[in-house]
Image (spheres, rainbow, N blue to C red):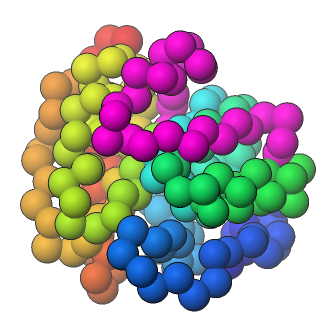
Amino acid sequence: MRIISGAAKGRKLYTPGNRSKKGSIRPTSDKVRESIFNILGSRSVTGNVLDLYAGTGALGLEALSRGAYFGAFVDHDRKAFELINRNLDLCGFSEVGIVYQRDLKRGLGFLEKAEPRVYDLVFIDPPYHTGATVTSLQELNDRGLLGKDGLVIVEDASGVDLPEGIGSLERVDFRRYGDTSVWIYQNMGVN
């Protein structure tokens, strides 16, 4: 697993190795990650990025490498917390990234206190088939954490049915890559 483009292009990220137990870290493949950033294409990858269920941090790190100003990474797993911090150091982004070890089932309220900012790009990549995606989308909308025209990139299992919209979040794209699907939502509200 490596950074595909930008300032840290080619850096090989630390990964969890072979962890097959339920709830383990499941990194987004280079192919799917590259496809996501190709879809974003002309949209500028600047501003603040939030990587939920971050795992290795590869999605948020890719955004930082491509020009995002700040990255917040959240995962409940202790191993993920350690991996993301190591990967931030490896890529030279320790000064522009912060990692939280939090259980996202308890919500995103801690972000309003710890990092009171609006995000321009959010990644949601929960364990597949848990229903956590819809809950996270709803909370992003309700808490106003996504900036105007901000994007949410969701990765979940193919076959999962996600809504066309939630509040001011409207689905603007959908792609399938084998057993993985990617949905893109845009904030059409006025944060």
Indicate whether residue 115 is drawn in magenta. yes
Task: Please tell me which residue is depicted at 77% across the width and 59% down the height of the picture.
Answer: 87
Q: In the displayed structure, would residue 131 be above or below residue 181?
A: above
Whether residue 179 is situated above or below residue 106 in the rendered picture = below
Front residue of 136 and 2: 136
Q: Position of residue 111 (x, y in %)?
A: 50, 23
Q: Is residue 61 left or right of residue 12?
A: left
Residue lying at 75% horizontally and 71% vertically, measured from the top left: 13
| Count of marks overlaid on the render | 0
- Looking at the image, residue 174 sits to the left or right of residue 87; the answer is left
Residue 62 sits in quarter: bottom right
Task: Quadrant for the N terminus, please.
Answer: bottom right
Image quarter hosting the C terminus: top left
Q: Where's residue 126, x and y in %? A: 36, 58
Residue pictured at 40% horizontal, 57% vertical = 125
Q: Quadrant of residue 171?
A: top left
Residue 49 position, x and y percent, is 58, 37
User: Relative to 51, is 95 above or below?
Assistant: above
Q: Is residue 11 magenta?
A: no
Query: Is any part of residue 191 visible from this angle?
Result: yes
Residue occupying image coordinates x 29% and y 56%: 183
Q: Which residues are magenta?
A: 93-121
**Residue 58 appears in the picture as rendered:** no
